[in-house]
Image (tube, rainbow, N blue to C red):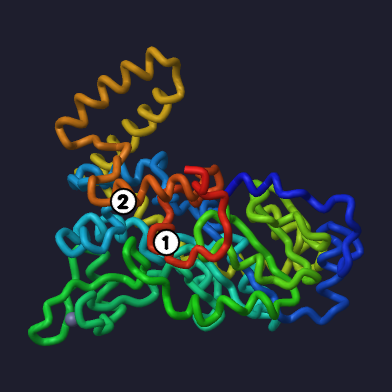
Amino acid sequence: MGNESSTPVAEDVPPVTLYGRTVEAVADYIKKNNVKRVVVMTGAGISTSAGIPDFRSHDTGLYANLARLNLPYAEAVFDISYFRSNPRPFYELAHELYPGKYRPTVTHAFVSLLHKKGMLLKAFTQNIDCLEREAGVPGDKIVEAHGSFATQRCIDCGLEYPEDRMKEAIAIKEVPYCERTRCGGLVKPDIVFFGEALPESFHRNRGLPASADLAIVMGTSLTVQPFASLPSFVREETPRILINMERVGNLGSRPDDVVLLGDCDEGVRKLADALGWREELEELWESKNPNKSMQEKEETKPKDKQAELDEKIEELTRGIDKTLKLSEDHQKQFEKDFKERDDTGKLNVLGEPGPSITKTKKQEQDDTQVNDSGATKDDLSHVYPHKDVKSPEKSSL
Ligand SMILES: [Zn+2]
């Protein structure tokens, strides 16, 4: 759906609500109209500057790291049926991604500032990293459309599992089991896996954008449904601002759309400048700087064998990525090498889908366009039955 950037852009049509299609006009609108129903919609792009690997993208090396665990295919790590048979790879990944390791970005701080000013109606996020929460946005103001690490439960009986025990388990990469007598089910964070339904809170709140007085869309490629349809629920005359590396969805096609292309953190700083909130924003962000001594401790810890292995694999993966960009000859050579290595079962870095989901993956690849901004064909689009916004699908196929 990156193709939607070809949607006619209403450059010539004068805005109705704003005085212009600029950040300054949005700031002016906010200040003069007692705006307090802001809906924010975010994706992986707002967390990349926090250092969170885009774990659904093959070229970050994270999947490669998982490959040593002999996953049948990379995405199996988020496959509920695979999880039942082997939860270890997921807990390996959870160890990498678990909240507390990363600092919220200035973009997360901006969402928090909106809340602090009593202007935030709801923050919809596709991210599972809980950085909105860590930036100070209360849980009831956030809709984690793909779930999050905030809560966890038994996958069999649904009994919630205590957070402190979960933290412990993830810290030592141990698989937690249900505490109910005679259940013994696996415990999983409430992250939406392939084959699972979206959280109820998404469905309960998905109509909210229609009552927003401003929509801010940031760091998302808007390729995954039903999340991608949220901005279209915003009323026609309500300003929508896109802060993103590229145009996405139909943002920019309405007279009161403002498109701010570039880095999210830079974008929100521009908006904060225009609003006169810059100092407050930076202060709030700084206050969310986690305990530095803990980080330093982590960094100076002597490397164990596992960490060394991780590094080596990552290095190798980077090499492979580069190889892919070289000439065809090189590429052929690489493929030859790769095949050989792949036979060992240890370096299946491309994470080809296993037979069980091949068809679904293929369909989804047709449905969702891969692009640079984070969400890719590997997003959780499989699980969503709610394809209520038309995508340029394979109608001709
Ligand atoms: Zn249970």
Q: How many marks?
A: 2
Compared to residue 321, the image places residue 194 above or below, namely: below
User: Which residue in the protein does label 1 denote?
Assistant: 293
Outermost residue on the bottom side: it is: 181
Q: Nearer the viewer, residue 184 or 377?
A: 377
Q: Is residue 237 left or right of residue 88?
A: right
Instruction: Give the foreground label among 1 and 2.
Output: 2
- Give the spatial CA distance, label 1 vs label 2: 35 Å
Residues at marks 1 and 2 touching, judged by CB atoms closer than 8 Å: no
Q: Is residue 307 above or below residue 195?
A: above
Q: Is residue 249 left or right of residue 170?
A: right
Q: Position of residue 2 (x, y in %)?
A: 60, 46
Residue at (70, 60) in percent of width and height: 268
Q: Earlier in the sequence, mark 1 or mark 2?
A: 2
Question: Toward the viewer: 294 or 261?
Answer: 261
Label 1 crowd bin: few (<14), some (14–19), many (20+), radius 10 Å: few
Which amino acid does the dot numbered 1 rest on? Ser
**Amino acid found under the numbered disc labelled 2:** Glu
| Residue 303 in the image, given as x and y percentages of width and height | 26, 45
Q: Residue at 27% across / 55% down in the picture? A: 77
Where in the image, quadrant-wise, is ligand 1 located? bottom left
Relative image position of residue 184 (x, y in whole percent): 12, 77
Residue sitting at x 73%, y 61%? 241
Of 368 and 33, nearer the camera is 368
Instruction: Identify residue for label 2.
Output: 75
The answer to whether residue 231 is visible is yes
Q: SS for tag 1?
A: helix
